Amino acid sequence: MLDTNTTFNQDMFRLEIIGESFTTSTLSEIPDKINSFTQYWFGRFFSNITHVLLDFSKSEIQDFENRNRVQLNRILTDPLFTFGDNLYPIPPGMMNSYEITIDKLILILKEIGVDKINDDLIKVLNIKHHLFPYSRTEFDRHSSEIGSLFSKIAILNTSARTSLVDKKSIISSKNKLLELTTTNFLRIFKIEKSIKNIEKNFDIDKISEENKKEIKERLLSISYRLSIFAIVVEHLQDIEHNFVECLKQLKAISKRV
């Protein structure tokens, strides 16, 4: 459980509600809840991405790089081009730099075993196969860590949306963000297919009484990991969009020098 004395944060609140919903569900309810939650999340993801792209297989930053490769290369590699003291867009509520925030999200994704989620979804109902270990305690810790990266107060304060950036940080952030988005956005399609298969193949009457508790724990573990993954991806979309706006601003400056 999250500490009730912790300063209110939208992410922590959302994840706490999600965590409680899964934890208090019966075994028969969990597959449907997983499907309902992920379908809602997929809908938000696709709605956000269609604002900037027609091809879901690309990320926004990859699309921008493909369209502006020559100018972007000049901005990031020409030692004579400096960013100056201009203010650049950052996501509402982001407490730290792009680089610090991205590095923390990379660590969280690693700690939830994001690269194993789809394989674990495929074998979650087969107790002969071991899953990546993940508990409610880890879920609460990651909820708190994500919450600490994005301030609810700052999100409401629209004046806190710009920051100074430096070239070294932008170069590092661009490369990490490009890898993060292209890898994890494509991962969503595989996850969606696997979740539909769970719902299709789930039959509580075929699960022995001795295995029901273990199956429930396995489904809960997957649910917690999917919840953290969904929130991180939402933030990645927001970070990526603002980062591209930052690159557009740098591109505009480059035309004047």
Image (tube, rainbow, N blue to C red):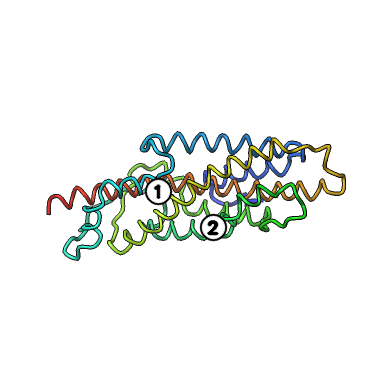
User: Is disc 2 surrounded by few (<14), some (14 to 19) or many (20+) residues within 10 Å?
Assistant: many
Q: Quadrant of residue 33?
A: top right
Residue in the image at 35% along x and 62% along y: 172
Q: Please give the name of the residue rendered at 12% of the width and 50% of the height, measured from the top-left corner.
A: 256
Residue placed furthest toward the right: 209
Q: Which mark is residue 239?
A: 1
Nearer to us in this view, 54 or 23:
54
Q: Position of residue 230 (x, y in %)?
A: 54, 45
Q: Is residue 63 left or right of residue 229?
A: left
Mark 1 to mark 2: distance in Å? 16 Å
Above or below, 185 against 43 in this view is below
The secondary structure type at the circle numbered 2 is helix
| Quadrant for the C terminus in the image | bottom left
- The residue positioned 22% from the left and 53% from the top of the image is 70
Q: Nearer the viewer, residue 81 or 128?
A: 128
Q: Which label is found at residue 108?
A: 2
Q: Amino acid at mark 2?
A: Ile
Q: Earlier in the sequence, mark 1 or mark 2?
A: 2
Residue 247 percent across, percent down from the top left: 28, 50
State the image coordinates of residue 166 (x, y, percent, origin top left).
28, 61
Question: Closest to the observer: 157 or 243?
Answer: 243
- Judged left or right of residue 240, residue 23 is right
Residue at left offset 74%, top offset 46%:
125
Question: Left or right of 148: which side holds 35?
Answer: right
* Residue type at tag 1: Ile
Mark 1 burial class by Cα count in 10 Å: few <14, some 14-19, many 20+: many
Q: Which disc is residue 43 wearing?
A: none
SS class, disc 1: helix
- The answer to which image quadrant residue 203 occupies is top right
Task: Measuring from the top left, give residue 183's x and y in whole percent.
Answer: 47, 52
